Amino acid sequence: DAGVIQSPRHEVTEMGQEVTLRCKPISGHDYLFWYRQTMMRGLELLIYFNNNVPIDDSGMPEDRFSAKMPNASFSTLKIQPSEPRDSAVYFCASSPGRQPGETQYFGPGTRLLVL
Amino acid sequence: ELKVEQNPLFLSMQEGKNYTIYCNYSTTSDRLYWYRQDPGKSLESLFVLLSNGAVKQEGRLMASLDTKARLSTLHITAAVHDLSATYFCAVDTSLTGGGNKLTFGTGTQLKVEL
């Protein structure tokens, strides 16, 4: 398997623009997670899905952030409008989710810079 | 609010030395993970600890979990330069049987000097 795939790998945009990050989980994994990593706040869970349904979005920072999972093989994280403080590395991860204690597999991340 | 604290935050050590990284957390959980992150890279799973007293070992790394003390340790034996990375612990607080909601620690940046 190719692992978790994220695109784009790097994104530079200007404040106020819409940003869409994409993720393809490992085939057969029921859970998908979106994380954000910054120097100041570390690694934070934003939202996660089970079988395409959002389970917990308590980590989503503001209404400017939204996430969708239209099918088992694709998810998006959208920021609209973007702000400089959104600059971070955004990771997508997936896990089988069949039983407790299963590993989450992380994608390569998207490095976002908002100018 | 769950807190997951690691110490030290930074660790510089010489090759061949031993050291321990500590992970303290503030809630009840018997599922704890250790991940490794190389600079500019993604996170790689190292260990999954699923019960009190669990111990896992891989090469020069050994992880343990004490759920009563809410403490996990990552012990490094005879460090080598290739172990230089940032190490994260993460506590699973999910309530259901499947999936896992992880809260990550602050990370410990390890540098092994040649």
Image (cartoon, rainbow, N blue to C red):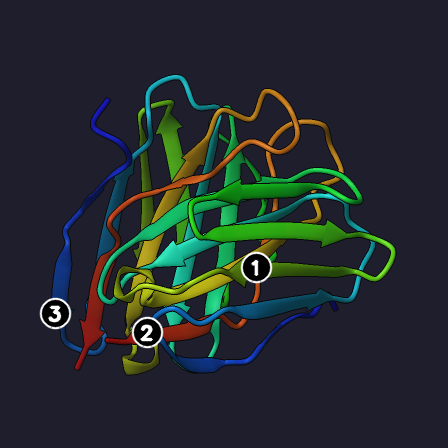
Q: Which residue extends farthest right?
A: B68
Q: Chain of mark 1?
A: B
Instruction: Tell me the distance, in whole angstroms, between the alpha carbons under discs 1 and 2.
Output: 15 Å
Residues beneath discs 3 and 1 located on the same chain: no
Q: Which residue is mark 2?
A: B112
User: Which comes before the other along the chain, label 1 or label 2?
Assistant: 1
Q: Is residue B85 above or below residue A73?
A: below
Amino acid residing under circle 1: Leu
Q: Position of residue B93 (x, y in %)?
A: 71, 48
> What secondary structure is found at the residue carrying circle 2?
strand
- Looking at the rendered image, the quarter that the C terminus of chain B falls into is bottom left
Residue type of the residue flagged with mark 2: Val
- Local secondary structure at mark 1: strand
Q: Which mark is residue A12?
A: 3
The mark closer to the camera, 3 or 2, is 2
Residue B90 image position (x, y, % from top left)? 58, 55
Q: Could you tell me how far apart the alpha carbons at marks 3 and 1 are, in whole angstroms?
A: 37 Å
Q: Specify the label residue B74 is tagged with.
A: 1
Eye-nearest disc, 3 or 1: 1
Residue located at (28% from left, 74% from top): A87
Front one among B23 and A35: B23
